[in-house]
Amino acid sequence: MTPASTGDLGWPLRRAARHHRERLAVADGELTLTYGELAARVAALGGGLERLGAAPGARVGFLGANSLAHLECVLGVAAHGRVLTDLNFRLAPAELAFMVEDAGVEVLVVDRANLEVARGLRTAAEALRTLVLVGHSGESDCVPYEDLVRGGLAITPVSPCSTDLAAISYTGGTTGRPKGVMLSHGNLLANATHNLLATGHTAEDVILHTPPMFHAAGVANVFAATWVGATQVIVPRFDPAAVATAIERRRVTLAILVPTMLERLLEHLAESPCDLSSLRNLQYAASPISPGLQRRAAAELPGELAQFYGMTEAAPTVSHLSPEVHERGLAGEEPYRSRLASAGIPVPGVEVELRDDDGLPVPAGDVGELWVRGPNVMLGYWNRPEETAAALVGGWYRSGDLACADQDGYIFVVDRRKDMIISGGENVYSVEVERVLIEHPAVAQAAVFGIPDERWGEAVHAAVVLEPGSEETELEATLVAHCRERIAGFKVPRSFDLREDPLPQSGAGKVLKAPLRKPFWSVTGREIG
Amino acid sequence: MTPASTGDLGWPLRRAARHHRERLAVADGELTLTYGELAARVAALGGGLERLGAAPGARVGFLGANSLAHLECVLGVAAHGRVLTDLNFRLAPAELAFMVEDAGVEVLVVDRANLEVARGLRTAAEALRTLVLVGHSGESDCVPYEDLVRGGLAITPVSPCSTDLAAISYTGGTTGRPKGVMLSHGNLLANATHNLLATGHTAEDVILHTPPMFHAAGVANVFAATWVGATQVIVPRFDPAAVATAIERRRVTLAILVPTMLERLLEHLAESPCDLSSLRNLQYAASPISPGLQRRAAAELPGELAQFYGMTEAAPTVSHLSPEVHERGLAGEEPYRSRLASAGIPVPGVEVELRDDDGLPVPAGDVGELWVRGPNVMLGYWNRPEETAAALVGGWYRSGDLACADQDGYIFVVDRRKDMIISGGENVYSVEVERVLIEHPAVAQAAVFGIPDERWGEAVHAAVVLEPGSEETELEATLVAHCRERIAGFKVPRSFDLREDPLPQSGAGKVLKAPLRKPFWSVTGREIG
């Protein structure tokens, strides 16, 4: 009596190729492919990886923007029993080197824009033997990507099971050292299911991939869209004009945007109107949204609005704020209106509990740590048994986010225990920025946190206590330059509070950020509880 | 690194009670309950069962029509770690006695209409100690059902995991002896997910439960509807007037009917029009449908039409014929028109392959046995290791149905290897009826098969070779009476072909039903391949 497998990541594309063979699968600029054509290329990818010596279980990296090749690697690397390590190309080379080394990436697929960085990584990381270059040939130290997907060489069959490792997705850590989130085949399929349940994609949908595919959110949408045989439209990076054009031209029905992108799209449309009438569902995710932006999006764009909330460790979807709440809330009806500031309720298949430090449920209305359970919850952190043991407790994942819930369990995230800032959809871990700031000789103490920002949702702000006698002239510019050398641009503070008096501290000597944050956030009227 | 649980059957109601507490959960005649109220009753049921001495793992039976109590047992018995054995009250007492004995049912919940049969079962089956009577008190040998759901007695906590046995659902067998299909928590949750994916239920839906809840299809709809917090409308049994009234009064948006019910509903509406404008989705399932009925349903009823195909061993959904195919097919557009006779394509999460007797895939277009794989596939047959080993092969379930597929993998079921007739949504195993017929002294040989029937989809037909010298006067009536004593009324042949010449046989002496069936089926124009 063996439990049936919940499937492997080859299922969605196998289904689409079998039942939607002639349907348009991908539109990437002028390039279009049916599901039959896409499946043939992805099938060849397995043989290609094998030919490069990447054995089953080997980590295969991707470093680049959204593209057909990126989509194919998402669909094909794990389906062929290898482990995808999809990297954020906006990170600094030193950060990427750490990840490539930590995961033991053997083969790295890279696009032209990131080739020089990739060459540096190959030099730095011992395991990394092979670079595969997307869309170009003639670089003698790289394998052309097209060779991999046109080979047709038969692969030794691999049949991953649902508990097998499929992807390692790096996320910042409270210690400042990135951690590789291990997601299984079953985790990613469960999440694709959860997204489908929330959104109701069908084969008739046309989905625009704007979130980067190196994020769990981008990956989730690839599997969800493929599973039902929907058409997937790719834009290499977010550009409001390109996005508006793609929606109009491809009759996109479903788009996923972070609030920052939504803001920029609305700005663009105000000046250059486009026919976006095909949109039936607009999802936003990944960072706090202002009530003004919610109102404008509902007023100025067609289709329904919905929100997703999640985290990489949950592959990523945890909860969903439905179109119904948006519609009735924006019409001023309670309790919907208040719930516009919430992250919604858990999707079917995911359970959430708010617990105190002892792991006991908090009384109704109180703030607690958000614990998550479901078939989407990660296997653990790669090579981090202690951090895994701390994060996975009795089948639950302790997210570190602090939240309260209203009487119907709508989740209001009030703080992130992990002290993370979400700026333009990117996660910035305060501790990592603080660690870099403190390395500068003029800095005695630093507290980094997010402050509200119309464009970025949150902007990175640093309160910095100077060493006595420090030269303050141009110090801001100096600190920015100091950070830029060491961490990704989106992590560098956008504003500073340079001061001489010490930061507020708890009795135990821990810096208290709440009083520092308060003046910035209390004016927005979005505080809960 | 433990794989995360895919959940237990308590999840759907926990979610609904947490997030849709005030929403209308159930309307059963005049009785209505919110999800908060329903959850409180179901929570008490655990304590009630414990008080009756049903330990975790004990089999708890249900014998009766659809009702609030039935819904509560579906939601509560497995969620509290007991195993639900839901029985078809249309079966003959001897059949039920076999099942109660085979499963070792200890507690049987029964409604008034089936009380006398239940008392007989208690006498016949050793393990069955306790009868719980729904909706009535004053029977000294029964526990009133309301005592169980009003107790509030705390239960010793049980936390079923997704691979635990949740239900035993009896199905006829090719040997004529019913087999208990073991479905796990994960199987039933997976199937609820598959149904939600196909239908797109939301909390705003109002779902009419017409399929009996003792069928896997009825159970599936309970969990799917509960999970999203939809309203569930109960009618005790199919009656076209009651169904039409319930749809109108409760503004039902989603109804599931077997073709026979659909036919009778249309007949009723032709004479007594009703406002059914709330319907957005009408699902039919469980037996072949005639093209005429498809057309009439689409023309005369509002909302989309869709079809489900499955079997108890798959918990039950395997495939789905979408509204798009119905709409475009009924408009005469190919290939959709031809696909109206198909069972659609597998739902996301379920895989199907057509294989030959050696387990190898058949060439495209050929007929093969339909194999099914997915997290919905049963654990096996209760206490039948040999039949389990024959049915579950390498993670796949061999359904016994024979099918071919068109170029896009639309499944056309052409025959059932198990020689099963589906009449009015009920499964009738030919071999079981043949075994009963052959017991009669006048019968030398019998071949039972389904013939097309406008009302029942298929009707049970028997070709009977008489013993030489048998008295033919009133023999049909005699055989009907003979069957009625031994098997359920719906299994009794509705027509006979009494003959003296032998039945056609293969070289190996096996009766060939194909030439017997052919004259009945070839006129319908529904033959495939």
Image (spheres, coloured by chain):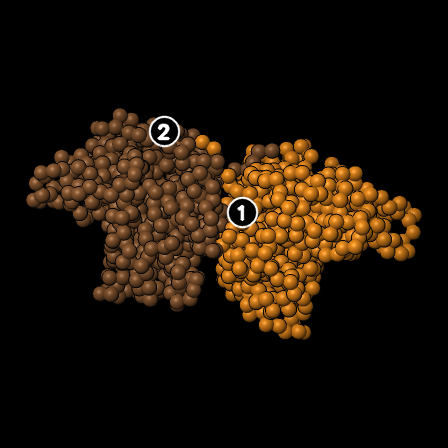
Chain colours: A brown, B orange
Location of the N terminus of chain B (image quadrant): top left
The residue closer to the viewer here, B263 or A498, is A498
The residue sitting at the top extreme is: A126
Residue at 59 percent across and 40 percent down: it is: B157
Residue at 79 percent across and 55 percent down: it is: B138
Nearer the observer, disc 1 or disc 2? 1
Q: Are marks 1 and 2 in contact (CB under 8 Å)?
A: no
For residue A504, side relative to residue A12 (left or right): left
Q: Quadrant of residue A155?
A: top left
Amino acid type, residue under disc 1 in the picture: Trp
Chain of the residue that carries numbered disc 1 in the rendered image: B
For residue B394, side relative to residue B480 (left or right): left
- List the residue tagged with mark 2: A383
Q: Secondary structure at mark 2?
A: loop
Categorize mark 1 by other alpha carbons within 10 Å: few (<14), some (14-19), many (20+).
Answer: many
Q: Is residue A286 above or below residue A184?
A: below
Q: How many marks?
A: 2
Q: Secondary structure at mark 1?
A: helix
Q: Quadrant of residue A307?
A: bottom left
